[in-house]
Each structure stands twice: as C-alpha cells, then as structure tokens.
Amino acid sequence: MKTISKTLLVISLLFFTVSCIDTDETLDANNESLDYYEELNISYGTDSEQVFDLYLPANRTEYTKVMLLIHGGGWIAGDKADMNNFKDYMLQNLPEVAIVNMNYRLANNSLEAYPMQINDITTVVNYLKNKQNEYVISNDLGFIGVSAGAHLAMLWSYAFDADNQTKMVCSVVGPTNFTDPAYLNNTDPDLQVLLDVFDEGDNIEFLEEVSPYHQLTATSPPTILFYGGEDPLIPTTQGTAMRDILEDLGVIHDFTLYENEGHGWTGLNLLDTTLKLHTFIETHLLEE
C-alpha cells in the first residue's frame, strides 16, 4: 500500500464526541424478562479490532430491527466511539431498535482495506444471524455510516447483502465513486490519497468494484444521503451523482446538500440531518 497521508488519520465526523457507557445488565438465560441489555466489546474475530457494542431494547421480539453503525476515519483510523452520538440519540428516541456499533480492522501498509473491511461487516451480520434466537432480533438491518464508514455501509448493502437484509442505508459524507473525475483528475494530495488507500488505485475496473455508485441496482435498499458543499475531502459530485443514479434507477432515496458545510456540521443543519434521518428510519426500517 502506498504511504498514507497523515491527513486521513484524523478523518472522522467533526460533530460527534466520544462517550462511555458501563452496564451491570445481563441477559436472562431463558430470554424470559427481555429487559434492556447492553454488552460492550463483543469479539467477532481473532483481531483485537474485531469487536462491537450491542444494545438490545426492552420488550424486543423476533421482529426487532437492527441498526449497524459504521465509523469513519479514511479506512485507516477511527473507532466505534466516534458513533456514540448516533447511538445515544437512537437509545433515547428510537428505543425499539437494536443497535450494533462495530469496529473493523483498519488498513495499513500490510493490510488492504478491501475486501477486509467488507468481510468484517459480513462476519458481524453472520454473527447476529447465529445469535438471532438468543438476542431475540430479526434479520432486518439498517446502516448508518460516516465518511469511510458510509462508503463501506453502501458498498456492503448494494453488493454484498446476499440475503437482502438491508432495509435502509444512510451515508453522511461518504465517498461513492472513485472513478469520479473530481478524484481521478485532481491535483490535491489530500484527495489523491483517498485512492492511494487501495493498492490498485489506478485500475478503473477495481475502482468501479469498490464504488457504491457502480454497484447500485434497481433493487438496492432505500438510501439517504447528506453532504457538505465545502467538504475538502468529498467532492460535491460524490453526492449529486449518487442522487442522480438513485433517481434514474428508481431507488427510494433522500438527498441533502448543505452548501456551506464541510466534512461535518453542527447547529441547525445537524438538527435538520437528525430529523430527516429519524423519519427515514421510521419509514423504511421500522415500518417494513
């Protein structure tokens, strides 16, 4: 792998902060009480980065939907703690949804991002399937991803969800198309390094394979997109072109471009994002 710019070591959504939760709750062995249950750092592989946090709602049933949270960090950095504000919001305002906040193996000079990180998502999904009766949850999934995590959420949902479990996916400032001229023809090293994460970055067929834009089909799940018009890392066309192909293929979608925002936002625009995402989750995950 090419040397990766330090810039991407700090890519993460700017408006999310880290928080910690401890729990003394335990699962009833017979699933009789179905109280709220929380377990942190559940291992799903042999690598120390292959862990996730689980939050199961009280009074859940076999129809309880599951939301997976995928953090950003340019495929080489970041942590599930970066998604804690999403998790906290859902615990308070969408308490009927089970939440999985996952880490995945980070890429470095000896570990390629693709397909390793997609494989990690598949492993978590399969883990949940195997634990479905114990956890008392359904197979229906939603995804919320930020930046690189949004790329992974869309790519998995469009190209690797063999059982069509995904009912909705959200991208917050996620890369969608690595063949975009805004990337391929750029002279900005901070943009070019996004392609350098992949060893085959000069291979158009490979770039199409890892681009959600090129994996989208008419049967892809409903998708909601949020982008900043002044984002220095994610060109506006990453959002607008995705919006257009979703429209062309007839895939249910929602798109918001905050013209004066960058790679994250706060204030009224964050409130707008929250309300739109909440409605999208209710419509396309909970009412399925």
Image (cartoon, rainbow, N blue to C red):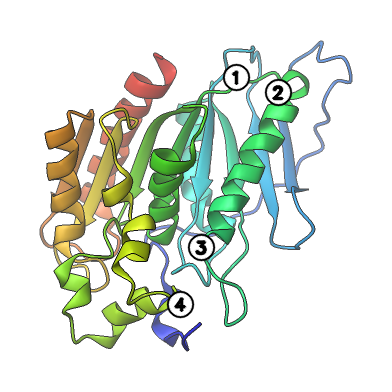
Q: Quadrant of residue 28?
A: top right
* Amino acid type of the residue that numbered disc 1 sits on in the rendered structure: Ser
Label number found at residue 114: 3
- Graded by Cα atoms within 10 Å as few (under 14), some (14 to 19) or many (20 or more), the crowding at tag 1 reads some
Q: Nearer the viewer, mark 2 or mark 4?
A: 4
CA gap, disc 2 and disc 1: 7 Å
- Graded by Cα atoms within 10 Å as few (under 14), some (14 to 19) or many (20 or more), the crowding at tag 4 reads some
CA gap, disc 2 and disc 4: 37 Å
Looking at the image, residue 61 sits to the left or right of residue 208; the answer is right
Query: Which sits earlier in the primary sequence, circle 1 or circle 3?
Result: 3
**Residue at 49 percent of width and 36 percent of height:** 161
Query: Which sits earlier in the primary sequence, circle 2 or circle 4?
Result: 2
Label number found at residue 138: 1
Q: Quadrant of residue 282?
A: top left
* Amino acid type of the residue that numbered disc 3 sits on in the rendered structure: Tyr
CA gap, disc 1 and disc 4: 37 Å
Callouts 2 and 4 close, C-beta under 8 Å = no
Residue 250 rendering spot, x and y as whole percentages: 17, 28
